[in-house]
């Protein structure tokens, strides 16, 4: 779910109660496709805490619905060296203590 304005149809992230495009208060969460593309990324080699597996990819993903909407996330399910800018990705939620984190994996 990503917030969307019911008046101008623009997507909003991070969520906010007023549309930054038209100032409408008609904003609510709407289903999103869960697809996007990698806009940029870095490979982290620093184990910031005990038990953290490295290396891992930190990426900025542009959402398919609106490529001006970005999520900062991790890319999972492949070797960090296999990740490239413009790779298509799909969301894969990871649950930890009742909180669901949107992680992405390369599509197809």
Image (spheres, helix red, strand yellow):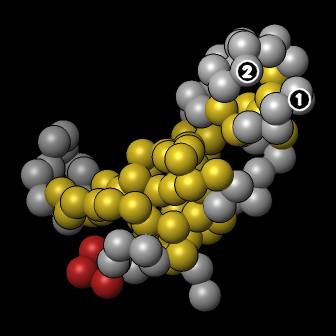
Residue 92 can be seen, yes or no: no
**Is 51 located above or below residue 36 in the figure?**
above
Quarter that holds the N terminus: top right
Tell me what residue is drawn at x 63 percent, y 20 percent.
20
Q: Residue 27, image x and y in percent? A: 81, 22
Q: Nearer the viewer, mark 1 or mark 2?
A: 2
Q: Residue 69, image x and y in percent? A: 56, 45
In the displayed structure image, the side of residue 68 where residue 98 appears, left or right: right
Comparing 106 with 49, the one in front is: 106
**Is 23 located above or below residue 9 in the figure?**
above
Alpha carbon distance from label 1 to label 2? 10 Å
Q: Secondary structure at mark 1?
A: loop
**Is 9 located above or below residue 107 in the figure?**
above
Residue 100 can be seen, yes or no: yes
Q: In this figure, which residue is indicated by the disc labeled 2?
A: 22
Comparing 33 with 77, the one in front is: 33
First of labels 1, 2 by sequence position: 1
Res. 3 image quadrant? top right
Q: In this figure, which residue is indicated by the disc labeled 1?
A: 6
């Amino acid at each position: 779910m990503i917030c969307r304005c019911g008046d101008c149809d623009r997507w909003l992230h991070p969520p906010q109660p007023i549309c930054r495009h038209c100032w409408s208060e008609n904003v609510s969460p709407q289903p999103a496709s869960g697809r996007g593309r990698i806009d940029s990324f870095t490979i982290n080699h620093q184990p910031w805490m005990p038990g953290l597996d490295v290396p891992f990819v930190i990426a900025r993903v542009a959402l398919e619905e609106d490529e001006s909407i970005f999520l900062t996330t991790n890319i999972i399910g492949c070797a960090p060296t296999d990740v490239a800018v413009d790779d298509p990705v799909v969301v894969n939620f990871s649950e930890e203590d009742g909180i669901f984190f949107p992680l992405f994996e390369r599509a197809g």
